[in-house]
Amino acid sequence: MELTVTQENLARALASASRVASSKTQLPILNNILLRTDGHRLMIAATNLEIATSQLIGAKIINEGAITIPARLITEFVGNLPKTTVTLKVEDNHLHITADGYNSTINGAVADDFPELPTINEKTAVSYAIAPANLKQAITQTILTASGDATRPVLTGVYWHSHDGALYLAATDGYRLSEKRLVETKSDVAAIIPTSTLQEVLRVANDDIAEIEVLFDESQVRFRLNDAEITSRLIDGNFPDYRQLIPATSESAVTVARADFMQIAKVAGLFARESGGSITVTVDADKGLLSLHSVASELGENTSETPATVTADGQVTLNSRYLIEALNVIDSETIIFRFSGKLAPCVLSSDQEKSDYKHIIMPMKS
């Protein structure tokens, strides 16, 4: 194999692949990145057997071929090269790299030992074409409520499913829940995508991509982002029937400016660090006020308030971090905050008539 390629394109593709290449494995080949010519382009791929990523970049191909190279070394080496043309040449499983005064050799391994990259039958797969901004927002708004508890695998991913003619994303860790309506659909899908896969999609998605294609088969999902592809196994199991946790009605509904709510939540959170993040939310319909109270037993206490439209008085205790994170991902200048007493789930959403995002937080025992 012999070819030339620009340092910028090569460095970017290697950085993406190296995030997937696994260093914690009994298969040493998974520490490597696969380089393989593909027509007039160079394919750069990596897999940890759960996620596989591949990217095609433009190259001047002199001789076709393939090799696998230790991910960390080649990624860091190419990343430190000047922005110039890089020549790659393979001889006897050694990769020779030259570029403007740099001349290095990296010992590789035969490409035949590298695991086969996963395939999806595109004719039978369920597919969606989604605008990158919409997909990135949906992932960002749901991924934060997924669980990190490996003993309940189905909660460690985001649940993509069709319901009433729309594709929804949902995630829960048992203490909070988020749901996002993404696009209309006539297809049926029910799939749990690992958060690590979706985090990688967020890293790769950029403004140069016109649309992201998402393809599902029975056990895998593939995200196609121009010349890059991320393929992942789905999480086995049934996601809980979360819709029964979303209250249809609430005793108190509070309409408040998101920036004001965020500000008093952050201040209240400073005093809540010693009490497990506990803050008390009180709303007063007559005064039109939303107030947050928190206590740091040895340091002091705080009460912050902001004007709001309130339908009925009420009080509830929440985790300050959960509240701040919810407010941080709702893309509306005005928030509707609904709750019923001290034990029922609280719902945050935008004030839009047909809000496509709901965020539910379970109260703390005050």
Image (cartoon, rainbow, N blue to C red):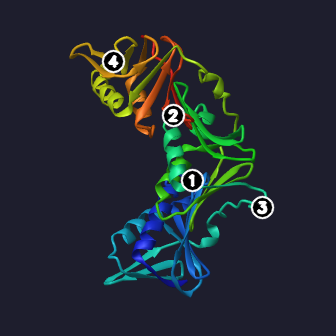
For label 2, the SS is loop
* Quarter of the figure with the N terminus: bottom right
Badge 4, how many Cα within 10 Å: few under 14, some, many 20+? Answer: many
Residue 347 in sight in this render: yes
Whole-percent x and y of residue 32? 52, 64
Identify whether 294 is placed above or below 327.
Answer: above
The amino acid marked with disc number 2 is: Thr
- Pointer 4 and pointer 2: residues touching (CB < 8 Å)? no
Q: Residue at x 34, y 34 (%)?
A: 259
Residue 11 or residue 249, whichever sits in front = 249
User: Image quadrant of residue 164?
Assistant: top right
| Residue 353 pos. (x, y %) | 54, 34
The residue at which mark 1 appears reads as 26
Q: Residue at x 42, y 33 (%)?
A: 334
Q: Nearer the viewer, mark 1 or mark 3?
A: 3
For label 2, count other residues whose C-alpha is less than 10 Å away and answer few (under 14), some (14-19) or many (20+): many
Front tag of 4 and 3: 4
- Specify the amino acid type for callout 1: Gln
Q: Earlier in the sequence, mark 4 or mark 2?
A: 2
- Picture quadrant where residue 305 is located: top left
Residue that badge 4 annotates = 291
